[in-house]
Amino acid sequence: MKPNTRDIVSAGILLSFALVGLLINGGLFGLGWEQHAIGTARRMGPGYMPMLGFWILMGLGLAVLVIGLFNGPEPLDRWTKSEVVFLVLGAVTGTAAGLAAARMPGWLGAGWNALGIGLFIGCMVVSVVESWRPLFLVSAAFALFGLVLEPLGFIVAITASVVLSSFADKTHRPLGVAGLVLFLCALCWFVFIWYLNIRVPVWPEFGR
Amino acid sequence: MDLIANLGHGFSVALTFNNILFCLIGCIIGTAIGVLPGIGPVATISLLLPITFGQPATTAIIMLAGIYYGAQYGGSTTAILLNLPGEVSSVVTTLEGYKMARRGRAGAALAIAALGSFFAGTVATILVAASGPLLTQVALSFGPADYFSLMFLGLIVSAVLAQGSVVKSIGMVIFGVSLGMVGTDVQTGQQRFTFGIPELSDGVGFVSIAMGMFGIAEIILNLERPESRNVMSGKVGSLMMTRTEFKRAVPAVLRGTAVGSMLGILPGGGAALSSFASYMMERKISKGRHEFGTGAIEGVAGPESANNAASQTSFIPLLTLGIPANAVMALMVGALIIQGIQPGPRMVEAQPDLFWGLIASMWVGNMMLLVINLPMVGMWVKLLSVPYRHMYPSIMIFCAIGVYSLQNNVFDVYQTVFFGIFGYLCSKLRLEAAPMLIGFVLGPMMEEHLRRAMLLSRGDWAVFIERPISATMLAIAAVALIAMLLPAIRKGKDAALQEGG
């Protein structure tokens, strides 16, 4: 037996997705929440096609799993201890921060801000580990953009997220980043504000 | 002749100032991203989708199409001059093209790549124009069961031809289909898998998926790899081909055009597969096959013609049947749907401006690309001196504002973050994102046709085998599947794709 770690993890993702889907949708021998009516083949309910899809996915996931047990060996890159620790830590703090923010009054709990805060904090925590930075610092910068955009306008949002994302690559120089920020502000103003005229604040609006 | 009158109408649409301008912009952007490694047409088109929504549908599609075939031109430039494929479809061009450049024949290689592409583009344009209305006639006689089977076939073939494990690819297709089920059920109005989130009642954001899985995930993966770009040193030299070179290139261009046109129509085909197929063919049958490996002009002329022909004929299934053949076409479907146009066989009649205008613009665009590329090669190569550390924040910011501008809602921004991380995970696990996107686009349509077919047949599944068209489609799908499960053929495909990139 030569296990192919990559395939086994893939199978795990497909299988768990199918299982959760079936539990929510219904069609798993009466188990789960059964949110959608299945109906009959002649008159399909809203749950019929999802049920079909998830069962096929389940079968394919099993096939990937069985094949993956034999077509290896192909190990995934091993994660170091700090990589694993901070990944878990990031997930926990991110979720906690998001849930806490949702209960807060005012801006923190309004709209989707709590989701953004959770994502941002979670990604930032994982970014402590250098090898995670390309993935999670770029994601954090993206989330930061969403958080800053509406209250502070898009000039501040671009500046903040470009500066944050620049730490993902070690070859950046401060002057280059400043030039990039200026260039992107000008380009985005031209394309999105002047040409497309989207409704988004450009500058911070205080006292609203 | 109807065809000529229709094409005339198409040119009258394509040659309006606005459409020429956006065709040019599309071609320039396409060439640029073709030259630059690390960003491909799929990422670019998903990046620019939100920008096109302010435009009329025809203009938007003309521009997006320009990016796709423009990238095929641009990709060959760096492949020949720097041994650096800007796109997957020009990987094989490096094999002979770079050798030619080392022999001092870079100019000739560039010239035949551009001229061959132009010829192939012209032939493919005519092919699209001629086959469009014909196929549409056939498609109009399709019942719901036939449609379902056709889409099923499309999904299977696109998964079979995708890189890597067939089972995993089909898994990703179904994953995409399931993701397409999120949102309001069209027939009963019930909310499915929305978890009470109002933003999900229209379904998971198509643009968020495309940008996250292709744009964000791609820049993260590129960031992880250390940059390795050598500075351009070689000279382009004379663009003129010698008489013998020209004589040898002509049959290769013809063969490449034929191969590309055919493979482009296949679901899952498209530019990358056809350039590889053409290279294999030239290496086996061309007159200069003994020179392969030392810079044979056939090895440039064939694949470059093939990938351009394919990038255009892959519009045929989209425009006539409403079925996307590859990820780029799935993006086009998304663009059309957001514009309020349902792709399908009725599009030729209902949207003549769009159909004929797009076809005419392809030819106009190919003409522009010839001018953009040949005399200005040096300028494009300079683009490579833009370091990636400046490119990735720009791509990120464009994604972020673009996805926000769709509905002025930050939820879409956060949704994109999730798909970015998921896309990164998928590519690490070799789960292909392209089949997933196609599944996501086709899923809701398949459900609708399945329900209608079963209602008409009173719940009898045999309808899919009893109708001849449907049965044929299913049979082809079965053959394709079985063929790929045979070890010998599978190994051949894997080897082919590996060599090709």
Image (cartoon, rainbow, N blue to C red):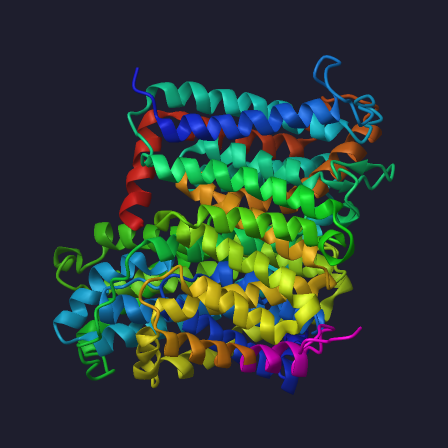
For image coordinates 33% across by 23% down, the residue present is A71
x%, y% of residue B396?
51, 63
For image coordinates 57% across by 44% down, the residue present is A94
The answer to whether residue A30 is magenta is no
x%, y% of residue A150?
70, 67
Tell me where residue A67 sits by quadrant: top left
Front position in the image: A193 or A148? A148
Q: Which residues are magenta?
A: A186-208
For image coordinates 52% across by 25% down, the residue present is A60
Where is B312 relative to B197, above or below? below
Indicate left or right for B48 with A133 as reference: right
Where is A120 relative to B474, above or below? below
Asked if one can make out residue B240 in the rendered structure from this viewpoint, the answer is: yes
The answer to whether residue A188 is magenta is yes
Where is B170 relative to A178, above or below? above
x%, y% of residue A84?
40, 35
